[in-house]
Image (cartoon, grey):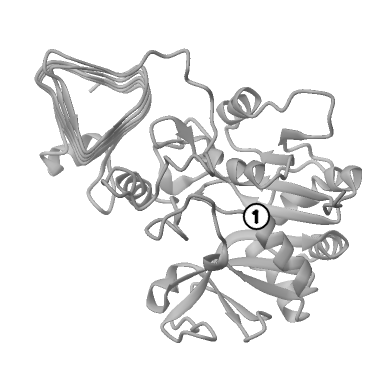
Amino acid sequence: MKTQPNVLAIVLAGGEGKRLFPLTEDRAKPAVPFGGTYRLIDFVLSNLVNAGFLKIAVLTQYKSHSLDRHISQAWNLSGPTSQYIASVPAQQRRGKRWYNGSADAIVQSLNLIYDEKPDYVIVFGADHVYRMDPSQMVADHIASGKACTVAGIRVPRMEATAFGVIDADEEGTITSFLEKPADPPGTPDDPDAAYASMGNYVFTTEDLISALLEDEQNQESQHDMGGDIIPYFVEREEAHVYDFSANEIPGSTERDQGYWRDVGTLDSYYEAHMDLISVHPVFNLYNSAWPIHTTDDSNLPPAKFVQGGIAQSSMVAPGSIISGGTVRNSVVSSDVHIDEGATVEGSVLLPGVHIGKGAVVRHAILDKNVYVREGEIIGVDRTRDESRFKVSAGGVVVVGKNEVV
């Protein structure tokens, strides 16, 4: 029987997500709903589970109740096995403090590593939208012989100024790691492309522990995985880049192969939803060969369209009723009601939203349980919208959870 390496996956899910406010006013960023029926954390957990990594610790901190509940309900691995997906809150194991950075979160959770005794540790972020087979990255890490591997995605070089950028030699050894450089370095085989860090890492366990413990004693460190731990390995020539474009996913198409979206801002969150609804989507949620798992909504009835209600170029989740209203180019989550004469265009409606008769909603994100009264207008008059709601740099109107408009 083939022996698999013992791998522990750690998912960093304590992010506050200030740039996604008001969607993060009442929840952690990884718990933000996405794509009608999912939450952001479902993407990284699906990638890990589909790849066969079933020892997963999710480190939480900020407003984690809905995230903890989602993990316990949607990601429960039952049975007498060593498999688990566990939500792990900040435990103050190394002093009376909360997490002071992503590296500090792992330091305060070293008991998980000591108990599991893995050969390798995967450290992934919890709030990106993508498909990836992490087992291919682990195999590449082992083959490299390095202590650390960083997943890099190729982006146009001058667009890489918003990311941590990896400079590597032809063998894949990282020679520098630059945070948001004004003049990003090109890749060895393409001077017009750059490696942007995806925030996904694989470590050989003993090397990771040594780096974390040394960083803990450094008073000048920000205790950040990307800002401090990765440069630690780069300086020692022990960091390797994994080219995400080489990752092969069953069922993927040429159009969505290599898709990755950091949804850290309201505009990127909105644009990622718009990526879902074209005839040939940039990101395909319907790939059954590498499914994105979440809570089973089989207890909800199918979406219903009555009294001439229609939806065009849109996704409509179970439990929703469009009664005489019109939906275009939008993502409608579960249990949404759209009344007679209402129009929704280019918008993202999260669960429980109710759009009253004759109301108009355009270019907007409505959080859970928002109620738009009869005849109300959102996304038409920007000056009026800015006096009432958050409006993103790209002009997306965002209405917070439970608001009555």
In the image, residue 210 above or below residue 325: below
Q: Assign a secondary structure to mark 1.
A: helix
Query: Can you give x and y, in whole percent of width and height, for residue 59 in the image?
Result: 69, 41
* Residue occupied by mark 1: 134
| Residue at image location 90% in from the left, 42% down from the top | 115
| Residue at image location 46% in from the left, 37% down from the top | 24
Quadrant location of the C terminus in the rendered image:
top left
- Amino acid type indicated by mark 1: Pro
* Residue 220 appears in the picture as rendered: no
| Residue at image location 78% in from the left, 80% down from the top | 236
| Residue at image location 85% in from the left, 48% down from the top | 113
Q: Quadrant of residue 220?
A: bottom right
Q: Nearer the viewer, residue 58 or 310?
A: 310
Q: Quadrant of residue 119?
A: bottom right
Residue 284 placement, left or right of 306: right
Q: How many marks?
A: 1
Query: Can you give x and y, in whole percent of width and height, for residue 226 in the image?
Result: 63, 64
* Residue 327 appears in the picture as rendered: yes
Residue 118 placement, left or right of 55: right
Q: Nearer the viewer, residue 237 or 214?
A: 237
In the image, residue 379 above or below residue 394: above
- Number of residues whose C-alpha sits closer than 10 Å to that of mark 1, classed few (under 14), some (14–19) or many (20 or more): many
Query: Can you give x and y, in whole percent of width and height, for residue 297 in the image?
Result: 47, 20
Query: Can you give x and y, in whole percent of width and height, for residue 245 in the image?
Result: 52, 67
